[in-house]
Amino acid sequence: MRMIQLERQALIEQSSIQLPSLEETVNLFKARTKPTVAQLLSTAKADKKMLYQPRCGVGDHKEMVDLLRTLEGLSRPDILSVTIDSYTRLLKLDQASEALRTDPRKLNGYPLINHGYEKARELEMSIDAPLEIRHGSPDARLLFEVAIAGGITSFEGGGICYNLPYCKDVPLRHSLRAWSYVDRVCGKLAQHGVIIDRELFGTLSAVLMPPAISLAFTLLEGMLATNDGVRCLSISYPQGGNVVQDVAALRSILELASKYLPEGTAVYPVLHEFMGSFPKDVIEADALIFYGAMVGRLAGATKLITKSNQEAYGIPSVESNAGGIRTARMASAAMFDFVSIDESLVQEEQRWIIREVEEIIAPVLEYAQKTSLQEAIIWAFEHGYLDMPFSSSRYAKSEVLPVRDADGAIRYHSQGKLAFSRETQNRNRRLVSDSFEIKDLATRISQDIFFFSDGHYRARKAV
């Protein structure tokens, strides 16, 4: 505890931000009357229900309160989000302050650090649903401290998933160490009975992300987090577009967790509805939202991050955002109990996804026997044994090139240096070559990226 206190004191002194002590924060949580995110997740998993959560965030505090209250009144989400602005994500607090002073509408989210922990408490107390912080910061230590001081019980991100998709020049060593601080504070809070839900952002760049890469990254982040004392993990996965592959990937989360994470860790599968290019047509957009919710239902996801039918046009109106929740929730209606999936296909796909994940992480875990897991992850990215397609970061080689197969499932045109077995390579090669023929690779990848927005899903055998 003393080491955390010293690090925390240094962090606060460097930032000149006023924060209560950890003891005061613990007392705040113990006086809480409404459920935490971790409690809601636990109940939902036991009841085999899916929770619904939208994204939302604006710069002005009063407008943020109004937005949360309006969303809650229109659609009764189970959990609500506070999406953080880009300046705060990169700790450009002076720019965030200037935007707040001149025109908060310039901000693409809520500058929580500038508003302070007392405003965070106002947000949390203004609604019935608990809040989660969603952001994209490679160094979220100060943001996390303000969030928990504000009584917020869920915090998204990790040292891989909130670095490589967004940042060009942030070293992995820095982001991994910064996020270790967040997880160690969560561990200390857990020792006092305060459980913070830590959601791991498996969506990554959301561009043709092979399931095994998403799951391998979140599994490694989960191992780091639990080593630091985290007890509640929401492991998220991005909807890819093929129902069999998506259901199999979501179901793989608990199987992988049971094998690699400590016994007693609470783990919850989370589905992010399609994060790629959305259809402009409102009917098609609503259909895609419903489809994503049905995938979550069939897979047994504990939580669904919803979309709106204005996704193709930018930040949605509050009415459209609420409408997306209501559309998604329809998938849980009893009238759709007849919808089922070929379980034999799901089981076969799940077996291969788990095998791919284990082959991806095997060199990392082997190297970690000589050093720490954190150092092994850095080493693996340096040598390409861990890799991410279309990464913004120079710390990932981006040699992996994904494509869709004939059924719209995401496979590998190039595996880079991922340590796949010959059997895995042969299966992938067969599935890719069985796809309908497009001679030009650039055209094929473009169609695969704009799978739903340009209607290419209609040309595939099944979605």
Image (cartoon, rainbow, N blue to C red):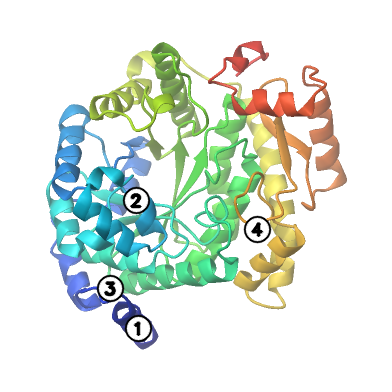
Circles 2 and 1, Cβ within 8 Å, touching? The answer is: no
Q: Residue 37: horizontal and vertical position, in percent?
A: 29, 51
Q: Sequence-wise, which precedes: disc 3 or disc 1?
A: 1
Residue 394 has which mark?
4
How far apart marks 4 and 2 lie (CA) works out to 23 Å
How far apart marks 2 and 3 lie (CA) works out to 31 Å
For disc 2, the marked residue is: 85
The residue at the far front in this view is 102
Circles 4 and 1, Cβ within 8 Å, touching? The answer is: no
- To which quarter of the image does residue 115 belong? bottom left
> Would you call the spot at circle 3 few (<14 residues within 10 Å), some (14-19), or many (20 or more)?
few
For disc 1, the marked residue is: 10
Q: Sequence-wise, which precedes: disc 4 or disc 1?
A: 1
Point 63% across, 75% down: residue: 372
Residue 192 has which mark?
3
How far apart marks 4 and 3 lie (CA) works out to 40 Å
> Would you call the spot at circle 1 few (<14 residues within 10 Å), some (14-19), or many (20 or more)?
few
How far apart marks 3 and 1 lie (CA) works out to 23 Å
Circles 3 and 1, Cβ within 8 Å, touching? The answer is: no
Q: Amino acid at mark 4?
A: Arg
